[in-house]
Structures are given as C-alpha cells and as structure tokens.
C-alpha cells in the first residue's frame, strides 16, 4: 500500500507539472491571440485553440469591457484580465503542486516514524522473547581437573594428587552442597540455577588463588536442549587445557548476559577449529 500511495503522489505531481506546462503554453497562445486582435492579421494555427482562448477573454470581458487606444491600436482590457486569470490559474496549480510535495513529505515522515515505532516494538519483543527463552536455560556444569604445578612435581616433594583432589572436593562440596561425578579425568559439578552462578563462581576462583601446589582446568557449560552439542563443547573446552582460567564457550557467555547482575566480566580467549567446527572460547574474570 505504501508503494501505491507513493506512486499516486508521483502521478499526481506529474499531472500538475503537465498542467503547468499546458497553462504556460496557453499563455503564449493568448499573447498571440491578443496580437492577432491588435493587428487584425489572422494567425492560422490558433484556430484549434480559439474556443479555450475566447472563453478566457469572455471571462475578462465580464470584469471589464473598457479599452484604451494607443498608436492606432485598441488595447482591450479583457485580454489583460484574461492573462491575469491564466497567471492566477498557474499560481493555483503551482501551490497545489507544492502542497502535494509537502503532503508527501509529511506522509513519508509519518510513515518512517510509524515503521520505526513498529520496528522498535518488534525488536523489544524479540529481546523480551530471547530473554525469556535464555532464562529458561538454568542447568549448568562446572568441570574441574587438577595437575601438580611444575615446581612441585619433583619426586622428593612427594605431592599426593589424590589427597589434594580430596581436599579440593571437600571444600567445594561444603561450599556448594553438590557432590561431583568423575568425568574426563576430572570432576563434574552439576547445578540447577544459572541465575545464581555469581554465588558459585567465587569458590572456584578461590581455588585459583589458593596456595595448593596445583594447577586447575575449570570449564563451565550451560545446558539446554541439545545435550550432544553441549557435551561436545565441554569436551573441547577440556581438551584446550586453559590452565588456571575459568573458560566457557560463547553460548554460556551469551546466557550469562541475561542474568540480572554480573559480578564477573568475560573476555575472548580465541577462536578454535576442530573437525570443521569453530569454537569461540571465553573466560570469566574478576572485575578489577
């Protein structure tokens, strides 16, 4: 419909423009018709236009029948008045032309504002729908695996990794209330409310700051409908072995944006490809 209205405006303006040209043409013919009256010499090509020309002269005669004799020529006022009518008609058409331009501008401006308002409302609804959809994703896993720091790996230091893992898991179970399962050479903690992840992450950051002789690989993964994909992402995170960082794929970081508050910031660790797939990896960082 919008395109049809614009076409109508274009057609209407073109018609008015053509009418203005016609009026100018008849003004020139009227001047020749007046010259014919003054000289008495007939101008042949005026004959087809005489009905229109004489009609305007008749209107002029209705206003005034006076005349003025000058240099043996009789200047009848009705021709001058008729010319004035042509000019008034041209002015009216021109004003209608300009009014149509203004009307079109007002229409287009209003149309743009309405479309902008519709798009804003649509975008807000999309954001709302996306927020609601993301907030439905609540379950998430945090994976932890350990290794002895290189400076403590000498045999004579006798660091018992199993004992260190017991100490770590005891601390995490006391703080989170979650019992881990063994997974991919480490431990998997499963949580049910990602909205409160900020109250869980401090315990894992505390591991990174601890004085334990361990390096940690910590990965966090949101869980949705595609468990196969999410498990693949988790395994890819683990295989990348980001030591002493809390790493996550882009879908987890994206879900984090929809939490009400953000105690941590995220930054990209890089893009990684495997088996034709690209993984965008981020890390959670404490705000400075």
Image (spheres, rainbow, N blue to C red):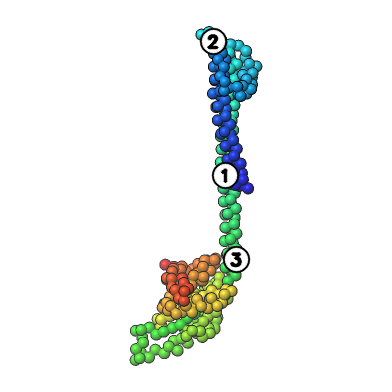
For mark 1, give the secondary structure: helix
Q: Which residue corresponds to mark 2?
A: 73
- Which of disc 2 and disc 1 is earlier in sequence? 2
The residue identified by callout 1 is 108
Q: Please name whichever residue, 245 or 165, is drawn nearer the observer in this view of the structure.
A: 245
Q: Quadrant of residue 65?
A: top right
Q: Earlier in the sequence, mark 2 or mark 3?
A: 2
Q: CA distance from mark 1 to mark 2?
A: 55 Å
Of residues 274 and 171, the one nearer the viewer is 274
Looking at the image, can residue 95 be seen? no
Q: Quadrant of the C terminus?
A: bottom left
Q: Closer to the camera, 260 or 60?
A: 60
Task: Answer few, some or many: residues within 10 Å of disc 1's Cα (few below 14, many 20 plus, some between 14 and 19).
Answer: some
Q: Position of residue 276 (x, y in %)?
A: 47, 74
> Marks 3 and 1: which is nearer the front?
1
Q: Residue at x 57, y 27 (%)?
A: 23
Quarter location, residue 12: top right
Task: Using residue 161 as the reference point, say whether residue 117 is left or right of it.
Answer: right
In space, the residues marked 3 and 1 are separated at their CA atoms by 35 Å
Contact flag, marks 1 and 2 (Cβ < 8 Å) = no
Tell me the element at label 3: helix
Q: Looking at the image, can residue 92 be seen?
A: yes
Image height of 16 relative to 54, above or below:
below
User: Between tags 1 and 2, which lies in front?
Assistant: 2
The numbered dot on residue 132 is 3
Q: Can you say whether 57 is above or below 8 in the image?
A: above
């Amino acid at each position: 419909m919008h395109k049809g209205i614009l076409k109508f405006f274009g057609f209407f303006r073109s018609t008015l423009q053509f009418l203005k040209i016609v009026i100018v043409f008849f003004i020139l013919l009227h001047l020749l018709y007046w010259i014919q009256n003054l000289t008495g010499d007939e101008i042949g090509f005026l004959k087809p236009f005489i009905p229109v020309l004489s009609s305007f002269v008749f209107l002029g005669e209705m206003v005034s029948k006076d005349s003025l004799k000058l240099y043996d020529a009789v200047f009848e006022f009705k021709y001058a008045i008729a010319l004035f009518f042509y000019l008034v008609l041209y002015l009216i058409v021109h004003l209608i032309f300009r009014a149509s331009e203004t009307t079109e501008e007002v229409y287009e401006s209003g149309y743009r504002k309405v479309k902008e308002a519709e798009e804003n409302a649509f975008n807000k609804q999309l954001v709302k729908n996306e927020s609601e959809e993301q907030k439905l994703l609540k379950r998430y896993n945090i994976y932890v695996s350990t290794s002895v720091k290189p400076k403590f790996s000498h045999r004579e230091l006798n660091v018992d990794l199993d004992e260190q893992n017991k100490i770590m898991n005891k601390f995490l179970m006391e703080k989170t209330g979650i019992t881990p399962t063994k997974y991919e050479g480490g431990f998997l903690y499963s949580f049910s409310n990602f909205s409160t992840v900020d109250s869980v992450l401090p315990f894992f950051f505390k591991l990174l700051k601890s004085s334990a002789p361990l390096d940690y690989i910590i990965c966090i993964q949101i869980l949705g409908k595609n468990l196969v994909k999410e498990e693949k992402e988790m395994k890819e995170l683990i295989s990348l072995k980001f030591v002493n960082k809390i790493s996550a794929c882009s879908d987890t970081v994206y879900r984090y944006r929809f939490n009400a508050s953000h105690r941590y910031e995220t930054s990209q660790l890089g893009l990684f490809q495997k088996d034709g797939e690209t993984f965008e990896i981020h890390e959670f960082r404490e705000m400075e």
